[in-house]
């Protein structure tokens, strides 16, 4: 007879929900203090929202790295946490997290992986992302082939005719990036005001003036199929006229709907779809559940990777105190502490 009883839960000191930069750095900060953890993420690879949303865009505000791509940042973080051997459970959404009477947590993922954890860190960005769709009849049939909500492997669109919708940073960044590389770039935005950085707007307008980029003020009206082939899109201009735009690919950057998903049901205090935390421990309203990165909120909160790294450092000390209240805490430095250097595998 086959045994179909569930596997026993994985017992660990900490479960980190989210394998983005802040979740990965949390592994490092916990490891320095001698705590073990497991990391769970609904995405199939580590990197979180920066890998999902802007894999090809350079990041300029990581200390000591004047410029690095999202993949390089994630690779460096994985290298940094390698000494701590934290298992990554990828492609698994956490569907339940319940605090027991003894203060520990029962956690389960959508595929049945279970954990018995002393503390939980939620580093889930702003939840799972759903792009705001283009809203044109028949678009679903071409999504992923000719209609896109993000850019993966920019080089495959070089030499193609592109139509790019949107007035925010993503739209203008890609208009500027593809200008001169694509066969043609048509930028469409519904109004004369832009949400993007003024420098990007000025650069886009200069490209339009130079005839490198076409610009239309208007909204998507209908697709232009050529039999089964995608031929472009019709744009209803703000002047009321209809403009036929030839395009091999359409990119729509209308922003994303962040969805907290099951996290919203775990009893933590929320403010505008973010988890309220204190700035001493970065603990939520549920003792033992901490939150770092874009998913949390507190007075003065800034959604920067840098801020999330700082939050992870302070959360680690708070988690140590939560798990081991009798243990005396003192700050040690990786430059001088033999204990920390041993944990990091530094040769002596």
Image (cartoon, rainbow, N blue to C red):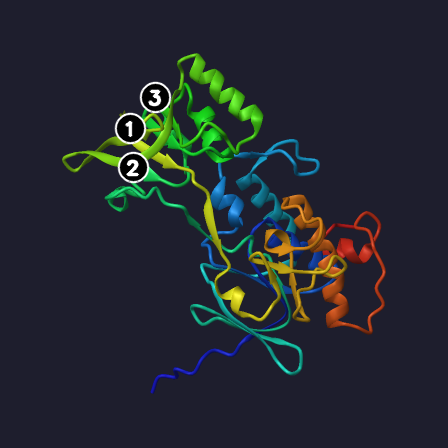
Circles 3 and 2: CB distance less than 8 Å? no
Q: Which residue is mark 1?
A: 247
The vertical placement of 347 against 277, above or below, is above
**Label 3: how many Cα within 10 Å (few below 14, some 14–19, many 20+):** many
261 and 333: which one is in front? 261
Give percent across and percent down for residue 35: 70, 64
State which quadrant residue 61 falls in: top right
Q: Give how far apart the Cα atoms at labels 3 and 2 are.
A: 15 Å
Q: Residue at x 36, y 28 (%)?
A: 238
Is any atom of residue 241 visible in this view?
yes
**Residue 226 place in picture, x, y as percent:** 16, 32
* Residue that mark 2 sits on: 146
Depth check, front residue: 160 or 224: 224
Say which residue appears at 46% left-offset and 33% top-offset: 167
Q: Residues within 10 Å of mark 2 (few under 14, many from 20)?
A: some
Of labels 1 and 2, earlier in sequence is: 2
Between disc 3 and disc 1, whose residue precedes? 3
- Which of the two discs, 3 and 2, labels the residue nearer the N terminus? 2
Where 30 falls versus 114 (above or below)? Answer: above
State the residue in front, 334 or 241: 241
Q: Secondary structure at mark 3?
A: strand
Q: Are marks 1 and 2 in contact (CB under 8 Å)?
A: yes
Q: Nearer the viewer, residue 26 or 298?
A: 298
Separation of disc 1 and disc 2 at Cα? 9 Å
Residue at numbered disc 3: 184
Relative vertical location of residue 139 with respect to residue 249 in this rendering, above or below = below
Does the rendering let one see residue 344? no
Task: Tell me where residue 245 appears, x and y as whole percent.
Answer: 28, 26
């Amino acid at each position: 007879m086959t045994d179909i009883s569930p596997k026993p839960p994985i017992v660990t000191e900490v479960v980190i929900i989210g394998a983005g930069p802040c979740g990965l750095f949390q592994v490092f900060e916990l490891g320095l203090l001698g705590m073990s953890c497991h990391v769970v993420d609904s995405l199939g690879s580590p990197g979180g929202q920066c890998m999902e949303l802007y894999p090809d865009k350079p990041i300029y505000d990581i200390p000591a790295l004047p410029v690095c791509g999202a993949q390089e940042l994630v690779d460096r973080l994985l290298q940094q946490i390698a000494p701590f051997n934290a298992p990554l459970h990828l492609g698994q959404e956490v569907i339940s997290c319940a605090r027991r009477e003894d203060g520990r947590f029962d956690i389960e993922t959508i595929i049945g992986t279970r954990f018995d954890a002393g503390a939980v860190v939620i580093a889930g960005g702003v939840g799972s992302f759903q792009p705001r769709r283009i809203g044109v009849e028949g678009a679903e049939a071409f999504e992923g082939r000719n209609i896109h909500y993000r850019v993966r492997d920019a080089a495959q669109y070089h030499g193609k005719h592109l139509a790019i919708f949107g007035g925010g940073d993503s739209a203008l960044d890609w208009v500027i990036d593809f200008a001169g590389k694509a066969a043609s770039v048509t930028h469409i935005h519904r109004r004369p005001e832009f949400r993007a950085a003024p420098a990007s707007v000025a650069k886009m307008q200069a490209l339009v003036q130079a005839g490198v980029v076409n610009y239309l003020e208007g909204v998507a009206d209908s697709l232009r199929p050529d039999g089964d082939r995608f031929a472009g899109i019709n744009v209803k201009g703000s002047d009321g006229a209809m403009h036929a735009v030839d395009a091999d690919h359409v990119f729509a950057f209308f922003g994303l709907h962040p969805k907290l998903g099951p996290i919203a049901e775990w009893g933590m205090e929320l403010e505008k779809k973010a988890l309220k935390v204190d700035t001493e421990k970065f603990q939520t309203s549920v003792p033992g559940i901490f939150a770092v990165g874009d998913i949390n909120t507190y007075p003065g909160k800034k959604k920067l990777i840098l801020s999330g790294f700082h939050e992870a450092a302070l959360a680690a000390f708070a988690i140590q105190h939560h798990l081991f209240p009798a243990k005396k805490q003192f700050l040690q430095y990786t430059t001088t502490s033999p204990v920390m250097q041993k944990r990091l595998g530094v040769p002596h």
